[in-house]
Every structure is written in structure tokens, then in C-alpha cells.
Amino acid sequence: MDGPLLAPDERLGDATRTSALPAGPAEFFADLGNMSVALPVLALTLAYVTWRTRQWFPALVALVTMALVPALVVPLQAGLARPGPPPMAPATGFFPSGHTATAAVAYGLCVLLLRAVFRTRATAHGCVVVNAAVGLGLVRQGYHWPVDVVGSWCLAVLLLTAAAWAISRSRRRSSSGTPRR
């Protein structure tokens, strides 16, 4: 692999891995990107918001959006075959980061869904902080390069934008009295 971002990406990744950032908290935040953590958080949010709002369409949008994460990430990883950082190399399939995409989309969907119940920006700010910590933890622990994380954030923005559009459209229809299909 070669390109203009390769050298700066490797320098930043190496600097982060060898930095004084504590490994314990970095591993904790990296683990927040695991499906075994992010999916139960999303499931609890789905259940709570569906129960509170009595609307099932936002939950359906969230489920489809979350299902798109592995459907998009796995083929990209296989096709691009980017080698991982030193502890993981020569293994390939690190771009985009599946853990970062899982965390960003799952926790982003939680924020989108909770907007129907709580009218606050604190959840969005918390989501950004958690996802930044997940990305930093993944790079610090040597699981991914920085560009792997940034690529997943870009993918998450696309998926969350589409989900937000679908959810807001359904809420506008249901609040205007127009019958939904």
C-alpha cells in the first residue's frame, strides 16, 4: 500500500501507540466498539424509545442501518486488504475499522432515537466524546491506524445522515396527521 496519507498515518499511529496514554482506559474505550457492547446498548435504547413513543418505524430504521455496518465494512476490508499496525501486521483487512463503525453507528442511532424523548444536546455531545475515545483507544492499543478510524467515521456519518432523514420524515408525517403506509 502506498499513498500520500500513508507516512503521516503511520507516524501518528506509532506516536499514539508509544505515548503515555494509559493502556487500561484505552482498552476499555476500544472495547466499547465491540458488537457485544454496542448492540445491547442500542437494543435497550430501541426498546425504551419504542415503548415511550409507541412508534416502531424509527426502530426499524435503526435496525436496518445497523445491519448495513457489517454489510459495508466486511467487503471494504476484504477488497482493500490494508495491513494492520505492528502488533497486527502482516494481517490485512483493517480499513475501515469495524469496531469504530459499530460504535459510531450504534451510539449515533441511540442519540437519534433519544431525541424523540429527550430534547437535549448533551446526548449528542456525549456520543461524540465516547466515539473519539473509542477511536483513540483502538489506535493506542495498536488495533488500527488513525485513517482506519477516520474512514469509519466517514461511513458512519453517511449511514447516520440517511437514518436521521428517514426518522425525521416519519415523525413529520405522523405529527401532521397524514396517514402512514
Image (cartoon, helix red, strand yellow):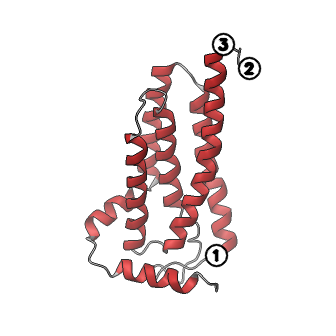
Q: Nearer the viewer, mark 1 or mark 3?
A: 3
Q: Is residue 87 visible to the viewer in this orientation of the structure? A: no
Which residue is the site of mark 3?
A: 177
Q: Which circle marks residue 181 in the picture?
A: 2
Image: 54 above or below 94? above
Q: Which residue appears at 44% of the width and 48% of the height?
A: 38
Residue 80 position, x and y percent, is 67, 73
- In the picture, the quarter occupied by the N terminus is bottom right
Image: 175 above or below 141? above
Q: Which residue appears at 47% of the width and 40% of the height?
A: 111
Asked if marks 1 and 3 touch (Cβ < 8 Å), the reply is no
Residue 161 position, x and y percent, is 62, 45
Which of disc 2 and disc 1 is earlier in sequence? 1
Instruction: Report the front residue among 153 and 45.
Output: 153
Q: CA distance from mark 1 to mark 2?
A: 43 Å
| Disc 3 residue type (three-letter) | Gly
Residue 174 position, x and y percent, is 63, 19
Which residue is the site of mark 1?
A: 81
| Disc 1 residue type (three-letter) | Ala
